[in-house]
Amino acid sequence: MSNRRTVGIIGTGQVGMAAAYALFQQRIADELVLVDLDRRRAEGEAMDLMHAQGYVGRQRVRAGDYADLAEAQIIVITAGVGQKPGEDRLSLLNRNAVVFRAIAEQLDRHAPDAILLIASNPVDVLTFTMQHLSTRPDQRVIGTGTMLDTTRTRSLLAEYYNVDPRSVHAVILGEHGDSEVAAWSQANIGGTPIVGHRICGKSYDPAVLDHILTQVKRAAYAIIERKGYTNWAIGLVIAHLVRTIQSDQGSVLPVSVRLHGEYGIHDVCLSIPVAIGGGGAGERLPIPLNALELADLHASAGTLKQSLAEIGLGAGPLPG
């Protein structure tokens, strides 16, 4: 591969283009290759971004086919059937699994060494699906997981306590969806635990945390009800994840990976803290959980395994 930082994006819908815009505006890639079944749309999106070079600097954005992804170090997959108002993520599964089979075949042929970032929903199930379908090592197939849920949580906590969200340390684990788990027992603001402590003049109130978690779980539904889709925040999540890999930072992020005994869970993809670097998903750093949180995480894994079973996925290969 060349030294040129090439990032591919499969799917030029709202999420794909929010990611492309964030990557372009932050100058994270030297070249973006946009792949979509609607080639003319991809061409139009590429032209539109290219016209802003006068403000962000020289970068190449072009429409392409799968063969044009041969030099891409990272490929973001946002393609799939969109989530409808009132539709839960898991109901998207069967249709998107079919889409992913076709994508995996093309990527293994043309870009077998690239790291794949899965952003299509349901992201945990589709990350597991892509790992089954692709010949590349599992650590090179990563789901965006609960990165979005985590930043939503930190943002809402910051609003409540009136602090900078970057000073809030709280993480969402498990499914990117209704069964996700807030690790409140480890949450803190500037090092002060939230549970049981008074912070910024506000006493610990478990009802507030319950309300925040409900808001986080319902966020996508609330946004889709109002505008039809979600895109900006996940676009920034994707850009941050790409930058983390490119710079080999080793940042610990809540991404969707396959578990091999962490928390006593096997053979399912869900989010736990993982060190992310140039090789993809590295060391897992499971944080301590209390008994209730651990039980909830096992329940989340069970929900995802049930979805995998519905399409014949599990510890064995994907049926033909």
Image: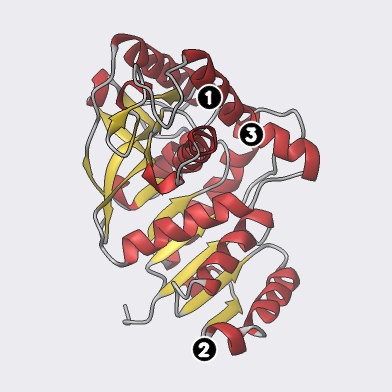
Secondary structure at numbered mark 1: helix
Question: What amino acid is at disc 3?
Answer: Ala
Q: Is residue 106 above or below residue 262?
A: below
Relative to 16, 245 lies left or right: left
- Mark 1 or mark 3: whose residue is earlier in sequence: 1
Q: Position of residue 197 (x, y in %)?
A: 34, 21
**What residue would you read off at disc 2?**
58
Task: Please tell me which residue is depicted at 48% across the width and 55% down the height of the picture.
Answer: 238
Q: Which mark is residue 213?
A: 1
Q: Position of residue 25 (x, y in %)?
A: 55, 73
Q: Is residue 289 above or below residue 116?
A: above
| Front: mark 2 or 1 | 1
Disc 3 crowd, CA 10 A, few/some/many (<14, 14-19, 20+): some
Secondary structure at numbered mark 2: loop
**What residue would you read off at disc 3?**
219
Residue 112 shows in this picture: no
Task: Please tell me which residue is depicted at 44% across the width and 34% down the height of the picture.
Answer: 318
Q: Is residue 186 above or below residue 239?
A: above
Residue placed furthest toward the front: 201
Q: Nearer the viewer, residue 222 or 179?
A: 222
Disc 1 crowd, CA 10 A, few/some/many (<14, 14-19, 20+): many
Q: Which mark is residue 274?
A: none
Secondary structure at numbered mark 3: helix
Q: Quadrant of residue 301?
A: top left
- Mark 2 or mark 1: whose residue is earlier in sequence: 2
| Front: mark 3 or 2 | 3
Q: Nearer the viewer, residue 308 or 300?
A: 300
Q: Is the C-beta separation of discs 2 and 1 under 8 Å?
A: no
The alpha-carbon separation of the residues under discs 2 and 1 comes to 42 Å
Q: Position of residue 57 (x, y in %)?
A: 52, 87
Relative to 316, 53 lies left or right: right
Question: What amino acid is at disc 1?
Answer: Leu
